[in-house]
Image (cartoon, grey):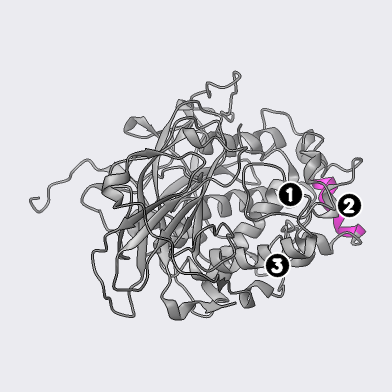
Amino acid sequence: MERGVVTHRMPCGLQTLRCNHLLLHSKNLRKPRHLSCKATSDRVDRRGVLLSGAAAAIGLATQHSNSAIAAPIRPPDLGNCRPIQHDNLNCCPPYCPTTEIVDFRPPSDSSLRKRRAAHRLVNDQEYLCKYELAVARMKALPDSDPRSFSQQWRVHCAYCEGAYPQVGFPDREIQIHGGWLFFPWHRLYLYFHERILGKLIGDDNFALPFWNWDAREGMTLPAIYTNEHSLLYDKKRNPMHEPPVTVDLDYVCCDDDPTLPREELIEKNLKIMYRQMVSNTKTKELFFGKPTWESSAPRRAIDPVFFAHHGNVDRMWNIWKTCLPTPNTDLTCPDWLDASFLFYDEEARLVRVRVRDCLDTTALGYTYEDVHLEWLQARPCVADGDPERAHGLADDLFPRTLDNETVRAEVKRKKTSRSPKKEEVLVIEEIEIANCQRCVKFDVFVNAPKGLTDTTAAQCVGSVVLTPHAKRGSMKTEARFLHQRPAASHPC
């Protein structure tokens, strides 16, 4: 490329993903890895999952930098919002072409709002009265007001269901799920929602609660959301998730298994948390998600508990940077830092805000209540047994549609040794989902003995889960998993 020549670069978007059960085997670090795929629930449609092309590969984690072909996502043109072709769903918020767009400025007040664990608020009547009053006033706003409760839902729906095409690339949609925009976009979404609620009750110190589902005391739906006479209650919520049902962090596309004792499920959840937050997030790319250069039932942002759930997700970002054995840092890629969005603030002004504006929660004026992180001590252990023999090389076994049987494949390694500063990452490419409106899930194991399906075992390196989308059609994606060295795991 000649110096000084300006090229028209495609903006960085994200591919939506989550999906069923997969296994990988290796006898030692110097031998090939063996890939196995298994869907563990008969209630999951495996026939809609196709692994094709280069189905799996193992390589060293590196920083992605494609600045020559990509550019930061730009704010959408709100006047070019497209209704979703699903039950005549209209996600588009109100918009006037003459509306002035202002750049974001951090709050000037010096005090920090403290977000507290929702399960600890059941007896705090003063706080609950404030929260319910704020929600009542938000719901009382006319639909034409961009701060209204119905419009808050539309903001999330439009960004997550592909209502906005990327500026300059009308055939590609903005998608904030499944990749590196997920954490910053939702942080900003909650930030403006929280500021609007506080403004409506005249309390600059008002803070949203967070659903502390990573702690044993918080692994049921918080009681403040279960009162049918409260504005925090949603009558459309699935009653199967009401207390005393315990959250299952290893979701398998069906309602929780009532036969698993609560204490066993809690211990399982703690190990899942360790894997998700410690074992599998040792690189920035694994934590934030992989950027791509094309975009990929509407999310329930109309239920108040949605904001508590995402409050805890946002808290995980803080924990990942400050509380883990090895502290982490944010991405430094300009395509991520300069990605920008539009939100309405507490004054109903349309605000342009970038990812780099939201990296520090204290600069945004809030912090989180300190809660004991029991899962930091819940490291999974290695299940007994020798690795089962692979069915063949991955190149010979794929493409293949997942069904009821486990698929085990040997994966050739690009390198048999690496420096301690690099991590070995398994990449499963070209995962094709035939129907995005179905729930799909498979798990991924390395060196698993025959019959192992326990996702809390150290041989399980993660899961791929696709939750249902409003849009019809198929999708393709990939998944990445960190392969742990033997010393990083311990026997039971």
Q: Which residue is mark 3?
A: 267
Residue at 43 percent of width and 48 percent of height = 340
Viewer-proximal residue among 326 and 346:
326
> Residue 486 in the image: x percent, y percent?
43, 77
Mark 3–mark 1 Cα distance, whole angstroms, equals 15 Å
Q: Evaluate whether residue 116 shows in this view.
A: no
Identify residue type, mark 2: Cys
Residue 257: mark in rendering: 1
Q: Earlier in the sequence, mark 2 or mark 1?
A: 2
- On the image, the x and y values in percent for residue 330 come to 44, 66
Disc 3 marks which amino acid?
Answer: Glu
The part of the chain drawn in magenta is 125-134
Dot 1 falls on a residue whose secondary structure is loop
In 3D space, how far apart are the residues under numbered discs 2 and 3 (Cα atoms)?
A: 35 Å
Whether the residues at callouts 2 and 3 have beta carbons within 8 Å, the answer is no
Q: Position of residue 206 (x, y in %)?
A: 75, 58
10 Å crowding of disc 3: few (<14), some (14-19), many (20+): some
Total number of numbered discs in the rendering: 3
The residue sitting at 80% across, 51% down in the picture is 245
> How many residues crowd around disc 2 within 10 Å: few (fewer than 14), some, or many (20 or more)?
few
Q: Which residue is mark 2?
A: 129
Q: Residues within 10 Å of mark 1 (few under 14, many from 20)?
A: few
